[in-house]
Amino acid sequence: MRLVFAGTPEFARIAFDALRAAGHDIALVMTQPDRPAGRGLKLSPSPVKQAALDAGIPVAQPRSLRLDGRYPDEAAEARALLEQVAPDVMVVAAYGLILPQWVLDLPRLGCLNIHASLLPRWRGAAPIQRAIEAGDSQTGVTIMQMDQGLDTGDMLLERVVPILGDTNAAQLHDALALAGGEAIVEALAALAQGGLTPIKQPEAGVIYAAKLDKAEAALDCTQSAELLERRVRAFNPVPGASIRLPGLSDPVKVWRAQALASSTSGEPGSVLRADASGIDIATGNGVLRLLELQKAGGKRQPVDVFVRGWQPA
């Protein structure tokens, strides 16, 4: 098929590569404007833009697609490009811009979105992290026919991905990205043969995955150890869970932890023991054992290394 691909981060880049490998004609790539990155804060292309440039595919980076918005000239230019390309389908994966109705109507077969959850559960911005935080045993990807709602369009195809007890957000992201690439290739093959049946999302089971907030990084030790352990995994690598330890002025990042069912009592947040096997923190229910940490400005360290350089007050 003749495609326009709209996406920005690594999750989308995986799907872009899968579509190219499957032989689709990607005539145009749309991605977010370059952003400052690295210590020098130099403008850097998104993973999708870099992949498109490497493949010699034209790239458009409008700041908005609303013809009546803040950047009408950029939106009008994007519209002219899309009309010139005349795509069969626009494939969207973590693009970062809202698609107005004129975009949804322009491709011959509409716009398909690769969403990283089993809809209608975890519509919205952070489905990967929220699934881990909630303790879900599985998630997946949904190929969805886009409409103007927030992840409300008809479902076309799903792929289930398990969430294991030690899976963090980075690992689940990679598994879902691969599943998304496979699913969109399968969906387009079926669509070309008229073999996809749209299924309306049920009203029951709708949950929204709120955007991650940096304020959530601080672990609230009045909560249960099980929830805190899931949050450590959900916020790895971004925003990174953090905790305050005695003897250190700055919060410490926690990259790996274990929830222990323990009757040991203590003020939530207090250190119960600390040695090479872990730092045990009292919580509202159970004990959270810290296993991998990072001081401000330092490197990640396994707990046996961390405790050797830590002098609690």
Image (cartoon, grey):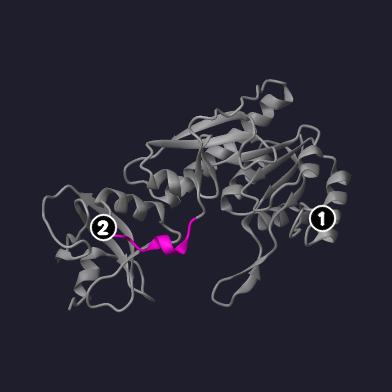
Please report the bounds of the magenta region as a residue range.
212-221
Q: Locate residue 108, reporting x and y percent.
A: 81, 33
Residue 215 part of the magenta-drawn span: yes
Q: Is residue 309 left or right of residue 144?
A: left
Q: Quadrant of the C terminus?
A: bottom left
Q: Locate residue 289, reporting x and y percent.
A: 22, 57
User: What label sits on residue 258 in the rendered view?
Assistant: none
Of mark 2 and mark 1, the one earlier in the sequence is 1
Q: Locate residue 274, reporting x and y percent.
A: 15, 65
Residue 308 part of the magenta-drawn span: no
Overall secondary structure of the magenta stretch? loop
User: What label sits on residue 68 in the rendered view?
Assistant: 1
Q: Is residue 270 left or right of residue 134?
A: left
Residue 275 is at least partly visible in this image: no
Q: What residue type is disc 1 on?
A: Asp
- In this rendered view, identify the residue nearer to me: 287 or 193: 287
